[in-house]
Image: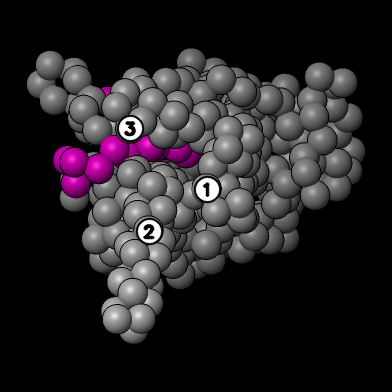
């Protein structure tokens, strides 16, 4: 009799423990690559969750992570792994992660970050509506115009701007089109070179440098993020100044940018995720535009060209 009591007591504890585990909200975080710039968005996302009471350390959040390690063919498998965990939401870091998650699940809410608007990502229907399970924070790419004017501001004699873009990534091609349109308005010429993988960037960057553009513009692109140091070295060796629209790339060697703060971008997405979890997983927020953009410069990179930046520019994080 005593053994039966002990047995049923242990079973009760086991079910209670399982019940408590199920009551803990869960998040699947989908990354396309290991990258210092993208990591800032990830850190901001989880900091926002923690500030709202959702923390893995405090055992108030279960986190599952999957990273495709820059291998696009692995992205589907990474996403399927997270879906199999049945999380309360999937946080998708970058355009390709967002597109993949939305295409592979209609039932799990997807929180986007470091991605363009659903329309620019090709995720809206013929009525212009985003998927019902998609929320988070997006960029419009309009900020690229301002970033491009920085080249004219600091190098007024510049006429030709080299760039590298990922021909297989929607955000990259959209950004290139925005860059071309802005360049035309400013009387500049864009010299674009396509890549499809980070392993190609050194040869492509060298080929571009041989054309001797007056400056280089780094687009928001997963391949560029993954191999930016290689690109920056090729440009620096050829004495080609590097500008960008991504503040995270300024901290990694570009001279200056105007664009979204990646940490704040992730933090804003984390606030939306917190809002959803606090609603008891009933109310999926609407996607919203990123709120925090900054002028940022790299003092070391600027010094190479004897550039002095106005006080409204922030120094890039080291």
Residue 181 in view here: no
Q: Main secondary structure of the magenta part?
A: loop
Indicate left or right for 148 with 67 as reference: right
Q: CA distance from mark 2 to mark 3?
A: 22 Å
Residue furthest bottom as drawn = 3
Where residue 115 appears, as percent x and y from the top left, is 41, 37
Q: Residues within 10 Å of mark 2 (few under 14, many from 20)?
A: few
Q: Where is residue 312, by image quadrant?
A: top right
The residue drawn where x is 32% and y is 39% is 110
The residue drawn where x is 87% and y is 21% is 311
Where residue 176 appears, as percent x and y from the top left, is 41, 36
Q: CA distance from mark 1 to mark 2?
A: 16 Å
Do the numbered discs 2 and 3 sit on residues whose CB atoms are within 8 Å? no
Q: Is residue 116 magenta?
A: yes
The residue drawn where x is 37% and y is 77% is 6
Residue furthest front as drawn = 1
Q: Earlier in the sequence, mark 1 or mark 3?
A: 1
Where residue 136 appears, as percent x and y from the top left, is 41, 30
Residue 255 in view here: yes
The residues colored magenta run 105-120
Q: Which residue is mark 3?
A: 281
Residue 276's place in the image compared with 142, above or below, is below
Q: CA distance from mark 1 to mark 3?
A: 15 Å
Between 165 and 25, the one nearer to me in the picture: 25
Q: Which residue is mark 1?
A: 60
SS under mark 1: loop
Q: Which residue is mark 2?
A: 16
């Amino acid at each position: 009799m005593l053994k039966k009591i002990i047995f049923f007591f242990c079973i009760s504890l086991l079910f209670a423990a399982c019940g408590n585990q199920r009551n803990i909200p869960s998040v699947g975080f989908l990354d396309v690559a290991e990258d210092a710039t993208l990591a800032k968005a990830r850190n901001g996302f989880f900091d926002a969750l923690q500030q709202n009471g959702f923390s893995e350390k405090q055992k108030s959040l279960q986190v599952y992570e999957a990273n495709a390690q820059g291998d696009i063919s692995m992205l589907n498998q990474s996403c399927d792994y997270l879906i199999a965990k049945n999380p309360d939401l999937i946080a998708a870091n970058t355009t390709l992660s967002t597109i993949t998650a939305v295409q592979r699940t209609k039932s799990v809410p997807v929180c986007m970050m470091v991605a363009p608007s659903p329309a620019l990502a090709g995720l809206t229907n013929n009525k212009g509506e985003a998927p019902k399970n998609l929320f988070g924070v997006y960029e419009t790419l309009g900020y690229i115009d301002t970033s491009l004017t920085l080249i004219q501001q600091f190098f007024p004699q510049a006429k030709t701007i080299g760039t590298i873009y990922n021909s297989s990534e929607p955000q990259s091609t959209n950004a290139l089109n925005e860059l071309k349109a802005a360049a035309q308005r400013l009387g500049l010429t864009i010299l674009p070179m396509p890549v499809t993988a980070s392993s190609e960037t050194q040869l492509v960057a060298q080929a571009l440098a041989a054309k001797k553009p007056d400056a280089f513009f780094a687009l928001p692109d997963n391949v560029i993020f993954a191999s930016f140091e290689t690109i920056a070295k090729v440009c620096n060796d050829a004495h080609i100044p590097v500008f960008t629209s991504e503040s995270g790339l300024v901290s990694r060697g570009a001279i200056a940018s105007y664009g979204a703060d990646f940490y704040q971008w992730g933090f804003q997405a984390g606030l939306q995720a917190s809002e959803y979890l606090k609603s008891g997983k009933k109310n999926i927020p609407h996607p919203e535009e990123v709120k925090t953009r900054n002028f940022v410069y790299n003092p070391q990179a600027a010094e190479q060209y004897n550039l002095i930046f106005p006080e409204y520019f922030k120094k890039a994080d080291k």
